[in-house]
Image (spheres, grey):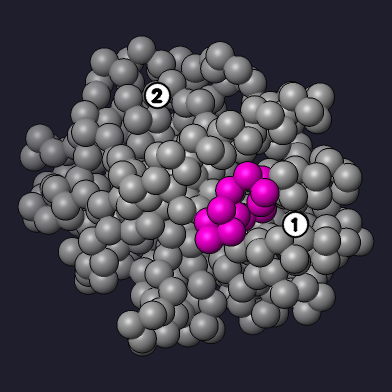
Amino acid sequence: MKITAIRAHVLEAPIAERFAFSQAWVDRRVGLVVEIETDAGITGWGDGYGPPWALATVIEKYYAPRLIGRAPLAGDALWEELYNSLRDHGQRGVPVQALSALDIALWDLRGKYFGAPVHVLMGGPVRSSVRAYATGLYRRRDDRGDNHRLLAEEARGYLDAGFTAMKTKVGFGFDDDIALVEMLRQTIDGGVALFVDANHGCDRVQAARLARAMEPLGIGWFEEPLEPEDVAGYAELRTRTGIPIAGGECSFTRHDFRRILEAGAMDVIQPDTASCGGLSEAKRIADMAWTHGIRYNPHVWGTGIGLAAAMQLLAVLPTTAPAFGAHQPLLEYDSTPHPFRQDLLVEPIRVADGIAHVPDGPGLGVEVRRDVLERWRVN
């Protein structure tokens, strides 16, 4: 079996109602889908988390010529070749995100070739289902009262849907942040996990103050409080609060995470499978985290293909302790407006009563709807 063609599809769609995190307002959703064709009639699909036009350029102009005509079963060898080809110029960021999309597609191809799900080829499953948390509760209005009303309704909707955990966004100033978190804790039951994400919108002083104020509210983790480069700041903050510190969606490959783990900077690492180096590198990072006794919950923000890749990884993530009551990793289930996320799949990945089941079909276990791909494709 040889690779005959590689296509990078840039997708874009407007959304009806914009929302905000600490850095910007979002008024459209974008994505990058990679398609790898072979002379055996098997197609592999991948998802890249990053600026889609930049990823598409790296994939089509630089990586694709190196892969055309090659055997897709040589997974680690191809990964190392592509990474080393841009190592002097791209040890993180766009080159690694582009590599991630290709790596996911190659795993999908291999699974389809052998007639097995990716998680079986990776040595699993450790688990066949995972508890999901709803990612949403973004800022919807500038008016605090109106914003709180809308987010309280949204939180109650997640409870009605069976979620037992959810995540909100902070980074809009101390008064706004603590008022929001207090409102949400009052809205949802104390037994429901509430996570808080700043999208690296705080400096060290702001993060420490907010963490201290949130401690009585039973926060499951404080995600990306600081800029991703400030590893020392994460390690310091971790000693100043009892709230677990999480992060890593903006970090890349085992090399970044080696520094994070050796510095004792985080309680929970969150590599994005479609960004950190793909399924191959995500599993290497997971094994490093296991060795350090650090929890791993993958960040998920992309198309249904990226969601399926995260599910395959979740099936094989090791637990941090060999016990019946050991912590199990969670699925981040993006619940924000997204016109083509679930519609892109013939059988979307669903969460029922807070639980998602790992697809057990060949490869990623999902099929792509070409009509939806073509509808939202802009290149």
Residue at 78% of width from left, 28% of height from top? 145
SS state under label 1:
loop
Q: Is residue 253 above or below residue 96?
A: below
Query: Residue 155's x, y, as percent?
Result: 56, 39
Tell me which segment is drawn in magenta.
Answer: 184-196
SS state under label 2:
loop
Residue sitting at the far right: 205
Please state which amino acid type lies under the numbered disc 1.
Pro
Asked whether residue 231 appears in the rendered view, the answer is: no
Residue at 14% of width from left, 48% of height from top? 361
Query: Residue 50's x, y, as percent?
Result: 55, 39
Please give left or right for residue 109 compared with residue 63 in the image: left
List the residue tagged with mark 2. Answer: 340
Which mark, by number, is residue 225? 1
Which mark, by number, is residue 102? none
Residue at 78% of width from left, 79% of height from top? 239
Question: Quarter of the image containing the C terminus?
Answer: top left
Magenta-span inclusion, residue 225:
no
Mark 2 neighbour class, 10 Å CA radius: few under 14, some 14 to 19, many 20 or more: many
